[in-house]
Image (cartoon, rainbow, N blue to C red):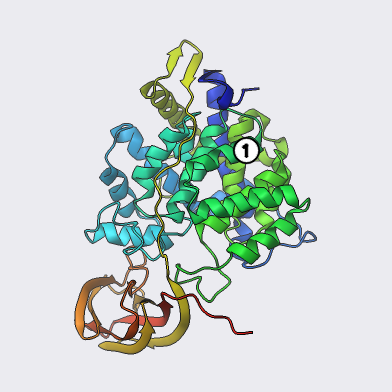
């Protein structure tokens, strides 16, 4: 058993142990996301009841990877960044990572897609993830992609945080970024201890105590000590932390892709699972919301902690067959990433003061330090969801009173085989043109929301969208507007 890092300035580990833990982390992610796949956002605002069986059988892994390759977005995004490290080295510039995923052929959503649009249209990182430029900055995106940062930084949580600072700000900011920093730290610390409670608590030290993300996870740790049943803690999480205020898709809706509440479910599973692989996966999946990505995280962290060889045989049924399959949109399989991830970890260990002597590795252990404090969407309170549900032929106009808005909608082809087309649109606020935007009628390069603006003066405003190049073969659809105030609602009882 490896001793906790707090008692040692360095740890010694064999190459075989290191490889086994890295394999465990990557295999665990794949197992977890496959297991939770059927329940992804099927249980929003509720947990999966204990009487409902959860599917797992021999051959399920391979079948899912072949039949539902889009399920593995948290893996192929990870692998995009791993591939950049492989091609350009550990010190690859941020633009290499940003351009690689922005120009990839896979579909994206939320903070990733908003960042992709920003990058393709000239807004570079870190501004591509900044909350004023990205309504999804608090979403889960980098949290589900940060596994690589911890796996290539064994026992070096601050090195993992530095990687996350560079890559995580491509698509996230504030709580959304903290989710990735926290997960990366848990993976990193899984190389130092076999106590999952210790790993969770130490990883939280990488997050500033004044952030709402830290406060949320601290609550889960406290409630775990208070309540013997995970369902009670789940209810406490819902009561205090389930309010979605930023992601336009989740406001006034039970859907919640916010990083901190989904991280809360991750911690819920890890603490109540107490190192038991099956129990951890069950609880994290049953917690609901992003019920594939959350068990992917817990299974990956546990896999790194106990190692590939110690993942129960039940969960590795059919894994050997699946390990040969390249994840869609990549040229990388699990077998390949095992070796590449191991290679990057060795390089990272040496670059950060460690030593490799034959089969023996000495890692210079890092005590976790908090990253910088940043908080998006402050004093932003949803007041109304105004349904629009209409195409914008040439112009859309509405009035509202408050300090911000986000207009949900998209540009689409009316005929599936029509060539690509990009609308040009202008946004006017109170008669003043504030933005000109491109609206591609293409799902991969789309703008996730039509327009948004925060931090406006608290008064009555007029919002007008003008389409500069209407085309009868294509359509701009505006479905709803989310309206905001800078004042918390007063609840009358």
In front of the other: 209 or 477:
209
Residue 65 position, x and y percent, is 55, 49
- In this view, the residue in front, 227 or 106, is 227
Q: Nearer the viewer, residue 268 or 283?
A: 268
Q: In which quarter of the image is the C terminus?
A: bottom right
Read off the residue under disc 1: 302
Q: Considering only vertical position in the picture, is 307 above or below 228?
A: above
Q: Position of residue 105 (x, y in %)?
A: 35, 55
Q: In which quadrant of the rendered image does the N terminus lie?
A: top right
Q: Where is residue 185 in the image (x, y as percent from the top left)?
A: 50, 38
- For the question of whether residue 414 can be seen, the reply is no
Quarter of the image for residue 196 reads top right
In screen coordinates, is 316 left or right of 180? right
Question: Would residue 105 be visible to someone looking at this image?
Answer: yes
Residue furthest toward the right? 51
Percent position of residue 46, x then y: 67, 66
Residue shown at the point (35%, 33%) measured from the top left: 86
The residue lying at 42 percent from left, 24 percent from top is: 349
Crowd class of label 1 (few under 14; some 14 to 19; many from 20; radius 10 Å):
many
Task: Locate residue 335 relative to residue 100 in the image: left or right.
Answer: right
Residue at the image point whose x is 76% and y is 57% from the top: 53
Examine the rendered structure and indicate whether residue 98 appears above or below residue 122. above
Q: Is residue 442 left or right of residue 215?
A: left
Q: How many numbered dots are placed on residues in this image?
A: 1
Q: Tag 1, which secondary structure?
A: helix
Q: Is residue 300 above or below residue 380?
A: above
Residue in view at x 43 percent, y 31 percent:
340
The quadrant holding residue 80 is top left
Q: In this view, does 194 lie above or below 375?
A: above
Nearer-the-camera pick, 230 or 207: 207
């Amino acid at each position: 058993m490896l001793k906790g890092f707090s008692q040692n300035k360095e740890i010694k580990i064999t190459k075989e142990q290191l490889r086994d833990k890295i394999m465990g982390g990557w295999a665990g992610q794949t197992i977890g996301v496959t297991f939770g796949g059927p329940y992804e956002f099927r249980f929003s605002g509720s947990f999966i009841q204990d009487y409902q069986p959860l599917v797992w059988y021999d051959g399920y892994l391979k079948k899912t990877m072949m039949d539902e390759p889009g399920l593995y977005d948290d893996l192929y995004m990870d692998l995009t960044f791993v591939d950049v490290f492989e091609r350009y080295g550990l010190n690859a510039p941020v633009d290499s990572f940003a351009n690689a995923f922005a120009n990839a052929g896979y579909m994206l959503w939320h903070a990733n897609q908003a960042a992709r649009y920003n990058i393709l249209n000239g807004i570079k990182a870190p501004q591509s993830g900044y909350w004023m430029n990205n309504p999804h900055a608090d979403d889960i995106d980098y949290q589900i992609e940060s596994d690589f940062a911890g796996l290539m930084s064994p026992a070096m949580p601050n090195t993992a945080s530095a990687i996350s600072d560079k890559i995580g700000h491509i698509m996230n900011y504030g709580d959304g970024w903290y989710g990735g920093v926290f997960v990366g730290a848990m993976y990193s610390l899984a190389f130092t201890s076999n106590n999952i409670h210790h790993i969770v608590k130490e990883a939280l030290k990488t997050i500033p105590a004044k952030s709402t993300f830290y406060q949320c996870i601290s609550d889960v740790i406290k409630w775990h000590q208070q309540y013997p049943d995970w369902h009670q803690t789940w209810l406490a999480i819902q009561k205090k932390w389930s309010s979605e205020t930023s992601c336009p898709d989740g406001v006034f809706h039970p859907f919640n892709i916010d990083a901190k509440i989904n991280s809360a479910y991750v911690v819920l599973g890890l603490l109540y699972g107490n190192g038991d692989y099956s129990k951890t996966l069950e609880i994290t999946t049953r917690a609901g919301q992003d019920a594939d990505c959350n068990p992917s995280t817990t299974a990956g962290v546990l896999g790194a902690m106990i190692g590939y060889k110690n993942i129960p045989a039940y969960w590795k049924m059919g894994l050997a067959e699946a390990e040969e399959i390249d994840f869609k949109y990549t040229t990388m399989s699990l077998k390949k990433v095992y070796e590449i991830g191991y290679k990057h970890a060795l390089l990272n260990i040496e670059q950060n003061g460690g030593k490799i002597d034959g089969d023996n590795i000495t890692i210079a252990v890092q005590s976790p330090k908090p990253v910088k404090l940043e908080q998006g969407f402050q004093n932003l309170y949803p007041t109304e969801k105004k349904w629009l549900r209409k195409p914008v032929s040439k112009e859309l106009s509405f009035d509202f009173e408050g300090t911000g808005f986000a207009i949900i909608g998209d540009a689409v082809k009316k005929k599936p085989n029509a060539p690509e087309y990009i609308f040009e649109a202008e946004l006017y606020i109170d008669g003043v043109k504030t933005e000109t935007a491109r609206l591609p009628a293409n799902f991969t390069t789309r703008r996730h929301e039509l327009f948004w603006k925060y931090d406006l003066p608290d008064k009555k405003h007029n919002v007008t969208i003008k389409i500069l190049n209407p085309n009868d073969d294509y359509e701009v659809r505006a479905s709803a507007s989310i309206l905001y105030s800078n004042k918390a609602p007063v609840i009358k009882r």
